[in-house]
Image (spheres, helix red, strand yellow):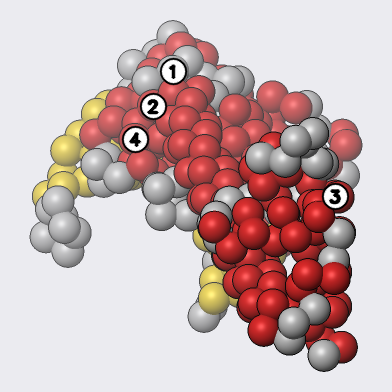
Amino acid sequence: MSFSQRCKKEVLKKDALDLKGELISLIHFIGSIRISEGKLNVIFKTDSNGEARYIYKLVADLYGYSPTFEIQDNPDKKNKRDYVIIVEDSDVSDKLVGLMAEGFIENYEDIEDVRLDEIKSFLKIAFIFRGSVNDPQRGYNLEIVSKDENEASLLKESMDTFSLNSKLSTRNDYYIVYLKDSDKISDFLAIIGATKSLFELENVRAIKSLRNDINRVNNFDNANIDRTVKAAANQLTAINKVKEAGVFEDLDDLSKNLANLRLENPYLSLEELGEMINPPLSKAKVNYRLQKFIKIAKDL
């Protein structure tokens, strides 16, 4: 099971964020209306047993009514089954149609006029039926797909109500509302109640961050070693050149002593060389005297 599927399964096991808000969103995304014997029926069809049971429970919890639950063959689909929730009671159907007619999705004007729980419900249902999120091991990307530009704009505004800074793009004939920032994806999962998935994502982020820190330290150490080796090689070349030119003995005893220590210990750091002098020299003073050899060598 993919990370995206686990995330959806998790939120479907939890209580509704807002019963009316989620049913409004469900009618919008997967609901349909038919007339049977002169009465309205509201129908929800999905290829997921878990999603169907969740919808069944929402209707039952809000109206105290048990809708019809059917399993229908569908040879055109991979799992070859559709799970259908049918609200046949005319009073309940009328109430659901009324919810849809009065809901903010169909009458949207200003997101600031919509209750936060309704916005959260809209994002939750949209993610379940139109969304996906990458396995954090492979990168960070959460997206919700829409065929309608107005719907996509509403999704974007809904996300941005929570400062998610979502992006909107097109792909073929579809509109894609997406997040690529791992912090924002974590915030989105928290909004829809996917706390277990959120912790899984944060755990992956922490491990990646630790690995990056270790790599940075290793790269820094390797760079320091390279610089130390290169500097020592330049110092050795300069000291030998000064000696070959016959001007070594003209230098002061401390400089000559330090030069001989460098020749004998080509891989020691400046700090370690300074500690071998009596009394010890600081790194800056050791570097100053060795740089004098490089300057003398250049002038020869």
Q: Secondary structure at mark 2?
A: helix
Residue tagged 4: 6
Residue tagged 1: 14
- In percent of width and height, residue 2 lies at 30, 45
Residue for point 75% across, 36% down:
278
Q: How many marks?
A: 4
- In percent of width and height, residue 184 lies at 66, 42
In the image: residue 136, left or right of residue 213: left
- In percent of width and height, residue 177 lies at 63, 58
Asked if 77 appears above or below 172 in the picture, the reply is above
State which tag comes first along the sequence, 1 or 4.
4
Residue for point 86% across, 59% down:
252
Q: Amino acid at mark 2?
A: Glu
**Contact, mark 3 vs mark 4 (Cβ under 8 Å):** no
**Contact, mark 4 vs mark 2 (Cβ under 8 Å):** yes
Residue tagged 2: 10
**Of discs 1 and 4, which sits in the foreground?**
4
**Of discs 2 and 1, which sits in the foreground?**
2
Q: Is residue 132 visible?
A: no
Q: Amino acid at mark 3?
A: Ala
Q: Which mark is residue 284?
A: 3
Q: Where's the C terminus, which quadrant?
A: bottom right
